[in-house]
Image (tube, rainbow, N blue to C red):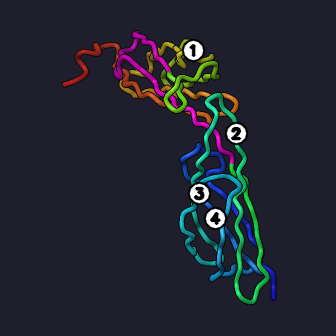
C-alpha cells in the first residue's frame, strides 16, 4: 500500500513543566489528507497526553503536559514528541516535533497608585519569581506607552528579585491611561512580563478630585 506521511507541530513550542502544549498531527498519502488513521503518541520524557481527536482532512489534535523536575537555577530540557500513524491498506508512518521545557519567570509590578496627576511621579517596583522564589540577576527591560516617561528602561534584578524605576506622565497625557510594560529575561528560563495601567489626571485637577 501507499505510505503514510506524518507531520507533527506544537503550539506553543516552549513551556514550563505542568503546562500544556497543543499537538497537531497531519497524516497524508501522496499529498491527500487521510482520515480514520490510528495515531499513537509518545514522548522521550515523563508527561501525559490528552485524547487524540480527529479534526478532518487528515488532521488530528491532542495535548501533552510534561511532568519534569526542573532545576531552580534554570535550564532547558528538550523533549521529542513522536506520532505514529497506521491504517489498514497503508504503510505506517511517523513524525516528531521538538518541545522545549524550562522554568517560567513570573513578573509582578507594584505601583503605589493607579492614578497620577501631570507633574507627579512615582516609583514602580517589578518582582521576578520562579515557582514562588525570587529570581536574581535577571535582565529587565521597561517600556511605556505614549504619554509616559520612565527613569530607567533596563537593568538587573537584585537578590530579592526586584528592580525599580520611576514613572512620570508627560503633560500631554492628561485624561488618558498610560501603560508600563516590564519584561524579564534570563538564560534557561521562559521570559515573563507584566503590565500596569496608570490613569493620568490633567494638571488642572488634583488626583483627589478625580473620583466620585
Location of residue 189 in the rendering, given as x and y in whole percent from the top left corner: 64, 34
Residue drawn at x 71%, y 55% as measured from the top left: 44
Q: Is residue 84 left or right of residue 191?
A: right
Sequence order check, earlier mark of 1 and 2: 2
Nearer to us of marks 1 and 4 is: 1
Quadrant of the image occupied by residue 15: top right
Give how far apart the Cα atoms at labels 4 and 3 are: 11 Å
Sequence order check, earlier mark of 2 and 3: 3
| Number of numbered discs | 4
Task: Tell me the quadrant of the picture where the N terminus can be found.
Answer: bottom right
Query: Which residue is denoted by mark 1 in the rendering?
Result: 159
Q: Secondary structure at mark 3?
A: strand
Stretch in magenta: 100-126
Q: Are marks 4 and 3 in contact (CB under 8 Å)?
A: no
Q: Secondary structure at mark 2?
A: loop
Quadrant of the image occupied by residue 182: top right
Nearer to us of marks 2 and 4 is: 2
Using the image, tell me which numbered label, if any, was put on residue 64. Answer: 3
Query: Per the image, is 108 magenta?
Result: yes
Sequence order check, earlier mark of 3 and 1: 3
Query: Seen from this angle, which residue lies furthest left?
Result: 212
Q: Nearer the viewer, residue 132 or 10?
A: 132
Query: Per the image, is 41 magenta?
Result: no
Amino acid at each position: 500500500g501507499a505510505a503514510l506521511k506524518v507531520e507533527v507541530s506544537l503550539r506553543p513550542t516552549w513551556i514550563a513543566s505542568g503546562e500544556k502544549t497543543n499537538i497537531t498531527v497531519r497524516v497524508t498519502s501522496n499529498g491527500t489528507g487521510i482520515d480514520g488513521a490510528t495515531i499513537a503518541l509518545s514522548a522521550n520524557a515523563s508527561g501525559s497526553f490528552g485524547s487524540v481527536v480527529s479534526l478532518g482532512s487528515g488532521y488530528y489534535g491532542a495535548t501533552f503536559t510534561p511532568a519534569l523536575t526542573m532545576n531552580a537555577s534554570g535550564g532547558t530540557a528538550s523533549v521529542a514528541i513522536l506520532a505514529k500513524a497506521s491504517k489498514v491498506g497503508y504503510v505506517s508512518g511517523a513524525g516528531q516535533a521538538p518541545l522545549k521545557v524550562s522554568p517560567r519567570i513570573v513578573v509582578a509590578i507594584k505601583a503605589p497608585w493607579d492614578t497620577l496627576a501631570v507633574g507627579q511621579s512615582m516609583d514602580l517596583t517589578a518582582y521576578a519569581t520562579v515557582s514562588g522564589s525570587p529570581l536574581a540577576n535577571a535582565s529587565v527591560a521597561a517600556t511605556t506607552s505614549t504619554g509616559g516617561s520612565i527613569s530607567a528602561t533596563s537593568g538587573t534584578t537584585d537578590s530579592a528579585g526586584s528592580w525599580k524605576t520611576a514613572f512620570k506622565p508627560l503633560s500631554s497625557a492628561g485624561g488618558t491611561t498610560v501603560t508600563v510594560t516590564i519584561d524579564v529575561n534570563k538564560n534557561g528560563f521562559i521570559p515573563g512580563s507584566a503590565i500596569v495601567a496608570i490613569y493620568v489626571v490633567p494638571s488642572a485637577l488634583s488626583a483627589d478630585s478625580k473620583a466620585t
